[in-house]
Amino acid sequence: MEEIFLDVQLREEVGRGKVKDLRDKGFIPAVIYGLEKDSQAVKIAHRQLIRLVHQHRIENVIINLRIQDDKKQKAKSCLIKEIQYDPVHSDILHVDFNEISLTKVIKVNVPVVAKGEPAGVKQEGGSLEHNLWELEVECLPTEIPKDFEVDVSLLKIGDAIHVKDITFPPNIKVLTSLEAIVLSVAEPIKEEVAVAPVEGEEKQEPEVIKEKKEVPAEEGEEEEEKEKEKK
């Protein structure tokens, strides 16, 4: 397993204003959550962290943090707990690390990768549904798989792969329900075709039948008298 080292410095800058100044100087604030110990506020050179993110797939990767201010202290074996990004510019704003013991099992989420093209997609026009993108497992930090590769090439429409259908290494304890569906092939979506109107056929407006207004008897007699006078 490749060892990754990252140099950090103890951080005294706290508070929104001071943290902003820290970022302006080219550092990223971070916190190390220790093993039954108090957390440590540290800062990382922005350039160094960006290089690490670009060169490695940092999810579930053990990172050895070397605190430059304390030469006597050994490097801390850590996993990245969370990375906070700027919602507008996508810049890294803050990093949380969890210190771990290399001899104790931990719970992690491992991504699922589909391999191949399903027969139901290629031959029948179906679509591959990725129901679960990650599986929760328990293992030693040094034995965390990069991913779980699942062959889907034989799947036809209506077929599915459950967690129990996947072969896992003996050192991995799967915590996700074995009955859960990971991948499946669904039927193609049928598009409804609108019926075009026949040429020359116009839409008929419904005939409005007006109700005949009833005239009172007295008014009717007056109208008759007026007609006689005119004659």
Image (cartoon, rainbow, N blue to C red):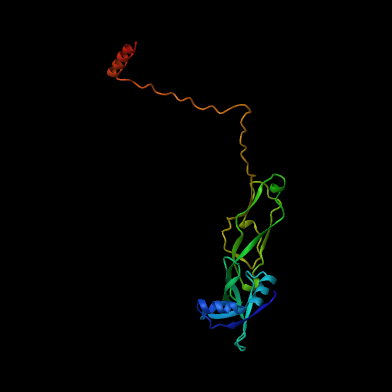
Where the N terminus falls, by quadrant?
bottom right
Residue 138: image location, x then y, percent? 59, 68
Residue 94 left/right relative to 53: left
167 lies above or below 14: above
| Residue appearing at x 54%, y 80% in the figure | 41
Look at the image and tell me whether residue 107 can be seen: yes
Q: Quadrant of residue 44?
A: bottom right
175 and 66: which is toward the camera: 66
Q: Residue at x 61, y 36 (%)?
A: 194
Q: Residue lying farthest bottom?
A: 72
* 218 lies above or below 26: above
Q: Nearer the viewer, residue 125 or 158?
A: 125
Mark count: 0
At a point 66% along the width and 64% down the height, the residue shown is: 147
Q: Residue furthest left?
A: 218
Residue 69 lies, in percent from the top left, at 60, 87
Q: Position of residue 179 (x, y in %)?
A: 58, 55
In the depicted view, which residue is nearer to us: 14 or 39? 14
Q: Which quarter of the image is occupied by the C terminus?
A: top left
Q: Position of residue 133 (x, y in %)?
A: 61, 59
Q: Is residue 28 visible?
A: no
Q: Is residue 70 above or below residue 87?
A: below
